[in-house]
Image: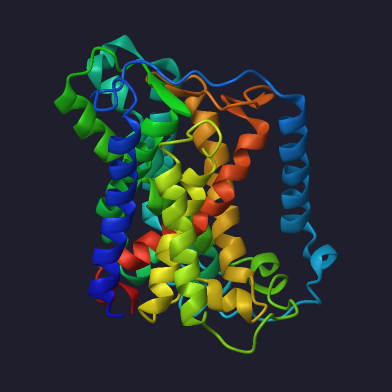
Amino acid sequence: MSLRTARLTACLLLLGLPLAAGWLSGFPPGFAEMPPQTIYIHPPGFSPAAYALLAVLLVAAAAFFTAPQLFGFTGPGPSDLGPFDWSLIPDPGQRFPAWGWAGLGLLGAGWTVAWTHPASLGRAADHSFVPLWLGYVLTVDALAYRRAGVSPLARSKRAWLAWFPVSAAVWWYFELLNRFVQNWIYLGVGDFSAFRYILGSTLAYSTVIPAVLTTAAFLSTFDHFRLRFARHPPRSVTASLSRRACWGMVGSGAAGLVLIPWYPLLLFPLLWVAPLLIVSGLLERAGLPSGAGNLLRGDWGPVVTLAAAAVVCGFFWELWNIHATPKWIYHIPWVNRFKLFEMPLVGYLGYVPFGPACWALWMLFTPSRFHE
């Protein structure tokens, strides 16, 4: 399969399936509101059993990230990070670059405005998310440079800049899926015009993938991620999935996207998993790395690093959201209690597949020259 065909297939599946299923099942009231005003799907109440099950998974995930030897990883070894263009090799002794200091300034200013919302700034105070997270990206990129002597920004400014428009499109896609499940809603945007909401949201969403991939680059400079997850008994001696396995992933993800509009309260976790399955399967068919080959060889380092990066970003997204205006809140079926900031603690599990999904979507929807 050519990359062009893979992209076209991905667009048809990712967009066409949930919209067609929504048309057949009936779109939720207010589906096309801009900005979204109200939650129309009312989730069921708290379930101790559901929360306990996810809490066990959360503890297992934490153990996996911190003690991989408990899960069959046999010891330190070099991870094959070659195809993952965010990966860096440690080279200590570098100076903290100028863009890092600029990032720290933006981060501090954005954080202050987000939490204090000074009246003197007027409506500009509603858009603190962009300088805050641009500051985060620059700061973490500089920390990666400090540890490795190179960073995503220093290595390729064009590829780094390309992250931002791709990121905006990717998060708008997840916003589309959220219109079915309504797991999160935004407060403080009721008086926004549609144009202001779309423009402000697009700028904010453009920082998501840069934040995740820059954090992955920083984490990849640590031996824990580069070495500890590199030796697991492989399931296959091949470096890529079979044709049947690829289409099995695509089919499973496609089924998930079809079912989400019909059963949004039950299948809301598929919002994060189904797109990853589709895009990963198509990447493999197009001959591009999706991370699956690394898993087959027993080298989990790249995928684990991406997952951990999303969890780190998730912590800061939720931290800086807690006193922000506008802000988001969650309505997650059965588990909407025992929160760390606005997010139910077990909800952080959703960031685990989100990290690999960010990288896979970037790989599929950007020109090949940015991956060299």
Image height of 194 relative to 149, above or below: above
On the rendered image, what quadrant is the N terminus found in? Answer: bottom left
Of residues 314 and 277, the one nearer the viewer is: 277
**Residue placed most toward the observer, 112 or 6:** 6
Furthest residue toward bottom: 237
In the image, is 239 to the left or to the right of 12? right
Labels in figure, total: 0
**Rendered residue at 70%/66% (across/down):** 224
Residue 202 at x, y percent in the picture = 25, 39
> Compared with residue 106, is residue 281 higher up or lower down, i.e. above or below?
below
Which quadrant of the structure image shows residue 68? bottom right
Q: In which quarter of the image is residue 200?
A: top left
**Nearer-the-camera pick, 317 or 258:** 258
Left or right of 75? Residue 302 is left
Residue 318 visible in this rendered orientation of the protein: yes
Q: Does residue 137 appear anywhere in the picture?
A: no
Q: In the image as oriented, which residue stretches furthest toward the front?
A: 24
234 versus 84 height, above or below: below
Q: Outermost residue, left direction?
A: 195
Q: Is residue 92 above or below residue 372?
A: above
Give the residue drawn at x 70%, y 70%. Answer: 229
Give me the residue at 51% from left, 68% from top.
94
Q: Which of 365 and 66 is in front in this view?
A: 365
Residue 58 coordinates in the image, percent (x, y):
72, 43
Q: Quadrant of the C terminus?
A: bottom left
The spot of residue 306 in percent (x, y) is: 54, 59
Could you say where residue 216 lies in the image, as x and y percent from the top left?
A: 52, 60
